[in-house]
Amino acid sequence: MEILAFGVQADEKPMLEAAFAGLHEVRCLDVFLSEDTAPIAAGYEVVSSSVNADLNARVLRILAAGGTRMIAQCSTGFNNIDLDVARQLGLTVSRVSSYSPYSVAEFAWTLAMAVNRRIVRASMRTRDFDFRLDGLLGRDLHGRTVGVLGTGRIGEAFTRIAHGFGMRLLGWDLVQNPACAELGMKYVGKDELFASCDLISLHVPLLEATHHIVDAAALRAMKDDAILVNSSRGGLIDSEALVTELRAGRFTGVGLDVYEAEAGVFFTDRSLEAVEDDTLARLVTFPNVVVTSHQAYYTADAVGQIIDTTAANIADHLAGRHSENVLVPAAAP
């Protein structure tokens, strides 16, 4: 059987082909699954997709009409898939329920340190042989307060690094993580966390309840010299409200690996095109903001685990097995 894989990055292709070697053929496409590209999947029983694919009702109907019976999402998040319609169409949908939490946690800290110590600005200067220190003043994080919204596996890994820095630990989650509590984390309400912390990092999933969890009120409550990092999902932050606060000269730094309107933009080259998204265009111009292209997960370790789990999910589907990774089980339309 041949599997059609959408949105495959160049670094991922040999890893994906190796995972299916001797089992199935895999056709790798660098385009993302959308209403325009879905007809390519005609005749393929199994397709894989990425978190930035748009699997709305129309896309799912095109896939089902073309003979697709399984969608293997190569990510943990699945807010881009209309699961109700997939269920109605009898499509099996799976995801990767977990992979290396260290990839994302370490990258979140990379962003925090980059904006705190002005690494991007310093690097750009030294390329021009400008070795002045003006405007590069950072702060020690030791002894300061970090707030972690979401203390699951990634939030815990982030917290352990914060503990190593010698920071005071505040957390917010619906369920407390005993491992974080053992490190000295104090769980508080969101309002207290926003108002008290020098560094805030987001590690909650994007759900209806967490959409714009960092809204205008939360941003106004934060310290003027706080650092905000988001390596989870773009929709957690009200981007327009963030621009308003940044224009007012607030915040030591903001590190964004995700953006709420990133679909169709991130993972693509738009360097020769006019930027249509005014909010994104404004964000990347602030000297205290670092925007990266949803790469926190992008380590050989994490990508390898994602691919291996996706291969296992497909094998389970073909064998009629069920696992914790199945979002919509096989059913007759």
Image (tube, helix red, strand yellow):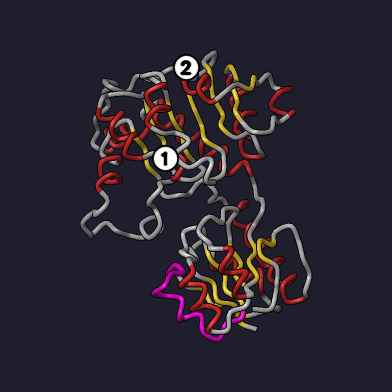
For badge 2, the amino acid type reads Asp
Which residue in the protein does label 1 denote? 256
Disc 2 on helix, strand or loop?
Answer: loop
Residue 136 falls left or right of residue 159: left
Q: Residue furthest top?
A: 143
Mark before the other along the chain sequence, 2 or 1 = 2
Labelled pair 2, 1 in contact (Cβ < 8 Å): no
The answer to if 317 sits in the magenta stretch is no
Which residue in the protein does label 2 denote? 140
Disc 1 on helix, strand or loop?
Answer: strand
Write the start and end of the magenta stretch as one range.
30-45
Q: CA distance from mark 2 to mark 1?
A: 21 Å
Q: Where's residue 45, x and y in %? A: 61, 81
Label 1 CA crowd tier, 10 Å (few <14, some 14–19, many 20+): many
Image point (63%, 66%), residue name: 93
Q: Where's residue 184, x and y in %? A: 68, 18
Please name whichever residue, 282 or 115, is drawn nearer the observer in this view of the structure. 282
Please name which of the two marks, 2 or 1, marks the residue nearer to the observer: 1
Q: Where's residue 282, x and y in %? A: 25, 41
Q: Where's residue 292, x and y in %? A: 40, 45
Image point (52%, 78%), residue name: 63
Please name whichever residue, 15 or 227, is drawn nearer the observer in this view of the structure. 227
Residue 221 falls left or right of residue 179: left
Quadrant of residue 126 within the rendered picture: top left
In which quadrant will I find the C terminus?
bottom right
